[in-house]
Amino acid sequence: MFTEMIKSEFKQLMGPLKYTLLSIAIVTGVIFLIVHFIFLILGVKSIGAIVLWHFITGSLNMLLQFLYPFIALCLYILGFDIFYKNMYSANTVSANKLILSKFIPMAIFQMSVRVALFISTERIMGGLDALRYGYGYGISVSDIVSYSEIAFMDVYDVSYGTWGIAFEIFIAKLVAIFATTLLLWLCVSIEKLFKKTGGVIALILFPTICFLLSFEPFTESLIMSVIRSYPKELTYVRLREITCYVRTTASILKNTVLIIIYYILSYIIVKIGLKRKSKVVGPNN
């Protein structure tokens, strides 16, 4: 039963996933070809090409920083519709199975899109660097972190500026995606608790909570306060390096706590919904 529920959710997500990945691939290819065509005409070493390279790089950075968070929010809004479908099945008796059957496919969907965005960013930005400096398409650890800061940017993930620690930032991004997906499910569950149809409450509640959390980096401040309590001679020299690790660690800790809170609240709300469903179905049987 649980496996069938997950398969059903994946079937609903396959259509949006295919169109999303196809769109990313087309946009990446078009930008890649246009940029290479321009540089082929002007010549890589010309002053015009260098000026154009700086202009394109700056424009793409601005575009990606504004566009990717918008795409992330749109993907979660898409999740509202998918989460609503068959939310309380008559055959479902376990709140855990219902939550996980919705959460697992949606989390995989969100990660797949962000990996595609990461590859797209690397192809575009890496291609520009290769044209300008001629060192090929190989990317370093700092490049991975730099690109992932954009491509894995989440709605309320605050682990920015962490140069040189690619593994930590990927973990922070993934945990943030898990937390945001569970927050989406929680908002949908709250909406379903009060209304039978529609998603107005959830649509308002989800962005509002994300917005409030983005302006409350309490975990980072707490950890930095503890670090600064040590003797200055032990922390002063490496304080900038420590700050980078603190930001990712704080993001992971904060979102892990949020995952637990979201899951517990979702479990309670879904349990109430399932009881209501059984009472409605029961007398008819």
Image: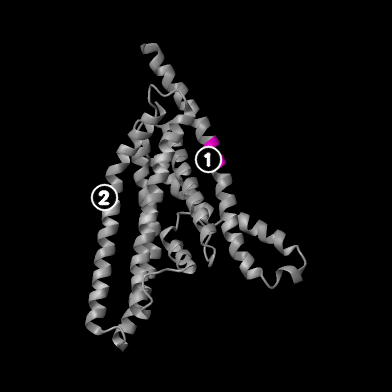
| Residue at image mark 2 | 19
Q: Position of residue 128 (x, y in %)?
A: 34, 74
Label 2 is placed on what type of residue? Tyr
| Residue at image mark 1 | 262
Secondary structure beneath dot 1 equals helix
- Residue 226 located within the stretch drawn in magenta: no
Q: Quadrant of the N terminus?
A: top left
Q: Earlier in the sequence, mark 1 or mark 2?
A: 2
* Residue plotted at (36% across, 70% down): 137
Q: Position of residue 222 (x, y in %)?
A: 67, 56
Colour setup of the view:
one colour
Q: How far apart in space, not on screen, are marks 1 and 2 (Cα)?
A: 30 Å
Q: Would you say residue 87 is visible in this rendering?
A: no
Asked where in the image residue 231 lies, by quadrant, the reply is bottom right
* Residue plotted at (67% across, 61% down): 224
Asked where in the image residue 282 lies, by quadrant, the reply is top left
Q: Quadrant of the C terminus?
A: top left
**Vertical comparison of 267 with 281: above or below:** below
What span is colored magenta in the figure? 260-264
Packing grade of label 2 (10 A; few <14, some 14-19, many >=20) is few
Label 1 is placed on what type of residue? Tyr
Q: Nearer the viewer, residue 86 or 6?
A: 6
